[in-house]
Image (tube, rainbow, N blue to C red):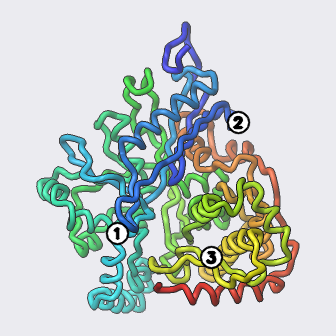
Amino acid sequence: MPCGQACSGAVPALYVVGVDVGSTAVKCHVYDQAAAVRGSSCRKVESLYPRPGWVELDPEVLWSQFVGVVKEAVQAAGLHMRQIAALGISTQRSTFITWHKRTGKPFHNFISWQDLRSAELVNSWNRSLLLKVIHVIFTVLHFFTGNDRYLAPSFLTFSTHQTSMKLSWVFKNIPEADEAAKKNNCCFGTVDTWLLYRLTKGSVFATDYSNASSTGVFEPFTKCWNPTLCNLLSIPMSIYPPVKDTSFNFGSADSEIFGVPIPIMALVADQQSAMFGECCFHPGDVKLTMGTGGFWNVNTGRNLFASHRGLYPLIGWKIGEEVVYLTEGSMSNIGTTIKWAQDINLFTNVDETAKMARSVVDSQGVCFVPGFQISANDPYLCASFMGLKPTTTRNHLVRAILESVAFRNKQLFDIIVKKVCIPLGTVRADGGVSNNSFVMQMTSDLINKKIEKPSNTDMSSLGAAFLAGLASGLWTDKEQLKKLRQVETVFEPQKDVEEYKPAMDIWMQAVKCSLHW
């Protein structure tokens, strides 16, 4: 019987669907009350590169993939759509689109968080006299008031990852969007907002606090879209969606889409969703996601830490009166680098990379520099291999790539320890690269902490499902969710960090040589 077809008699809705719309794939899992996966589906996300540095997604293709994976996963589970109690949606952050409020027609493709079209605008602003004046004003305000909300603007810098500069670029370069905004007819949405809008046939325009706070345009201290920043960049405030709780009844998917109306009970940003899926519910809980990019997140509870260089505050989730804050540090080009290495035939199967890395004593002095570095935030950093020799083999190159991931993990962790003034617990890892035992063990050695890897590393899907299941009543509270968590492997420190110092020092020299290419 087709998945959307009604079956005879009353069918209990005891399953929840979690969808993760990531940068490389759209994944859907159907979970039962024990959080066991009953059915899955995955489709590859095809990025578009219309110009050098530009990264886009076709909204119609993404929509088709989303609907497709939900239908396929429910069918794979052998279930009917009527048995789905709730849908939770986790999405890549800061990727956005604008569209006409009346017609629903997009003004452009999704502009990805990886897109670099605003690089010149970013550099211009970061060198501007106005930004220096802003730094001085807020430094003085922070000195006299001691209020941490003035600390972040005191050393505000823009980056290409932020939505703000790319959104400013849209209104400067797409006249249709600018004209619609002037007439109050332009809508802005991250991926979650667009999907919700499509699922409800245009009747619901909203986002949640986790996605909003990840744009760089939303003020986590006041929990509002930032009017000062928008005025500074000439972005109209009328374009933004209302912000709702993360675990919340957003309405139902139109019955024409899946055959029956399915309640949409959670919208959540992917890293915050993975944090929730890992059950990092308490202050000091730490999550490390290694997927397309790398993300360290620390639960800071009710305390919102102001931005420091390399770290920034986010809203993890809001459920009723509970607001949980996170501190995050990020790095690009982890999964993408490993995929590139596979594409140029450094290895055949990603599962063999850990064995290849261990087959040599060291990288023989070879260093790999990824295309973006957290210590420099330089969009013009040159990705490169350095220290190549006639004796260099594929194994040395693969080891150098994997070592660069662990070294960057060490850099970010050290910043977190220095800046986040709360005791840190065991690190919980997820994402595709967490399946690489070489990277995991080396990271554990470098940070001198235990790292747990769950049996299912698709934590963003599980987190979205948990949040949706709580809103629908499938699960009662977070204590029940903690009992469902399953750890597959625990990595404990085996080497002293000093043993890695010579190799890391050489790698850091290689990074310095690649800056501002």
State left or right for residue 66 relative to residue 109: right
Residue 168 appears in view: yes
Determine the CA span between mark 3 and mark 2: 33 Å
Counting from the top left corner in percent of width and height, residue 245 is at 44, 49
Which residue: 49% across, 65% down? 314
Q: Amino acid at mark 1?
A: Arg
Q: Which residue is mark 1?
A: 117
Q: Amino acid at mark 2?
A: Ala
Per the image, label 2 sits on a secondary structure element best described as: loop
Name the residue furthest front. Answer: 390
Task: From the viewer's side, name the closer residue of 192 and 353.
Answer: 353
The percent coordinates of residue 200 (x first, y second) are 35, 34
Q: Quadrant of residue 338?
A: bottom right
Q: Which structural element holds mark 1?
A: loop
Residue at mark 2: 36
Chain-order first, disc 3 or disc 2 = 2
As drawn, the residue found furthest toward the top would be 8
Front-most of residues 425 and 51? 51
Specify the quadrant of the image occupied by residue 370: bottom right
Compared to 385, does 467 lie above or below?
above
- Between the C-alphas of marks 1 and 2, the distance is 42 Å
**For residue 34, side relative to residue 19 (left or right):** right
- Residue 411, percent from left and from top: 65, 79
Residue plotted at (42% across, 36% down): 64
Quadrant assignment, res 291: bottom right
Q: Amino acid at mark 3?
A: Leu
Residue 378: mark: none
**Circle 2: is it few (<14), some (14-19), or many (20+) Cα within 10 Å?**
few
